[in-house]
Amino acid sequence: MPLSFCIVDDDGSARRMLQHIIEDSGLGEVTGTAECGQDGVRLILEERPDIVLMDLLMPDQDGIETINSLQAQGCRSKFVMISQIENSDMVGRAYRSGIEFFIRKPINKIEVESVLHKVNERYAINRYLDEIKLSLGKLEGLQFGLAPAAVNKRSVKEIIQPILMNMGMISEAGSRDIILMMELTAAREDNRTLPPLKELYEMAAATYKTSPSEAAKEVKAIEQRLRRALSAGLINLASIGLTDYGNPKFEHYAPLYFDFEEVRLKMREIELGRESGKVKVNLKKFLQVLHLELLEGLGR
């Protein structure tokens, strides 16, 4: 089944060119186009495309605001940003909003095809893995004479540990805090929503039985341990990507858990032998993605 695309760009010629490239190259079907952010939101929520090509700069609202609005309304599409701007702060903001890749203007047919082939491959792999998980769950249930819903569920620790191991951060002290916070979140009545970071830290600090006077210090210590753990994970993934850009661990974890622009900057530092030791990590994004994977692993 071909993938569906929507294009949101205030440049009519760019929309037509992108549509021709997608359809002439057999990448998928363009089910709709829009020339501004607000029209794009309405179109995408109605069409529910697999992939959205979104212009960064538009007259009514920029592409990042549009993506944030869509995600807040439950949109699950994959996003590719189109822009002629190469400002590192803006690019970082775009990756933090959850885009998969950038396409730079002026539009180049070869670049568009290359980027969209990668997006298509990643989408197909994720869909295939979801189907395998579903099939395995049903087979386990049949093997033991159980309905799929009655298959033994893994614990929070059993779900989270392999993820942290794959990112090379399980040996960091902050990994213990991460597992604890996910266990505490899963035990909450409203476990589908991740609490604010400060509340998470306070919940974890309370379990360490610190005195009220030491609680604030423990909250800060938890945040520092988390930053060190995430920094180790980002550096490890950057090293993997530098050696093998197609490595499955790098392809899955680097853009999903971290701001990919920061991963690329670290790769460049390592490549040039200019290790600064400085790493910017987005704690909120990391924990939100981990929480979503946890919910999926718990079948919630």
Image (spheres, helix red, strand yellow):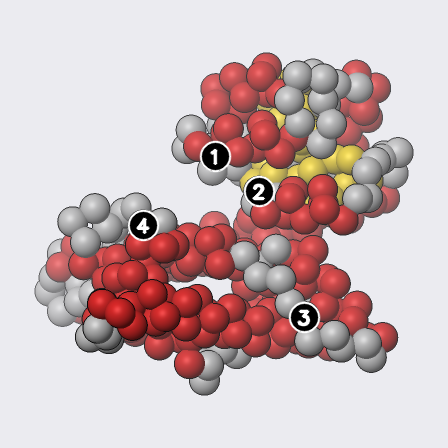
Q: Please name the amino acid that badge 2 sits on.
A: Ser
* Residue drawn 30% across the image and 46% down it: 193
* Residue drawn 42% across the image and 58% down it: 287
| Along the viewing direction, whichever of 49 and 240 lies nearer the viewer | 240
Cα–Cα gap, marks 1 and 3: 31 Å
**Residues packed near mark 2 inside 10 Å, few (<14), some (14 to 19) or many (20 plus):** some
Mark number, residue 71: 1
> Residue at the front extreme?
213
Cα–Cα gap, marks 2 and 3: 22 Å
Image position, residue 40 (x, y; %): 59, 20
Q: Earlier in the sequence, mark 4 or mark 3?
A: 4
Image position, residue 186 (x, y; %): 23, 58
Image position, residue 132 (x, y; %): 39, 59
Cα–Cα gap, marks 2 and 4: 19 Å
Name the secondary structure under disc 3. Answer: loop
Cα–Cα gap, marks 4 and 3: 28 Å
Q: Earlier in the sequence, mark 2 or mark 3?
A: 2
Q: Please name the amino acid that badge 1 sits on.
A: Gln
Mark number, residue 97: 2
Q: Are marks 4 and 3 in contact (CB under 8 Å)?
A: no
> Residue at the bottom extreme?
171
Above/below status of 24 relative to 227:
above
* Residue drawn 72% across the image and 22% down it: 58
Nearer to us: label 2 or label 4: 4
Residue under pointer 3: 278
Name the secondary structure under disc 2. Answer: loop
Q: Are marks 2 and 3 in contact (CB under 8 Å)?
A: no
Residue under pointer 4: 195
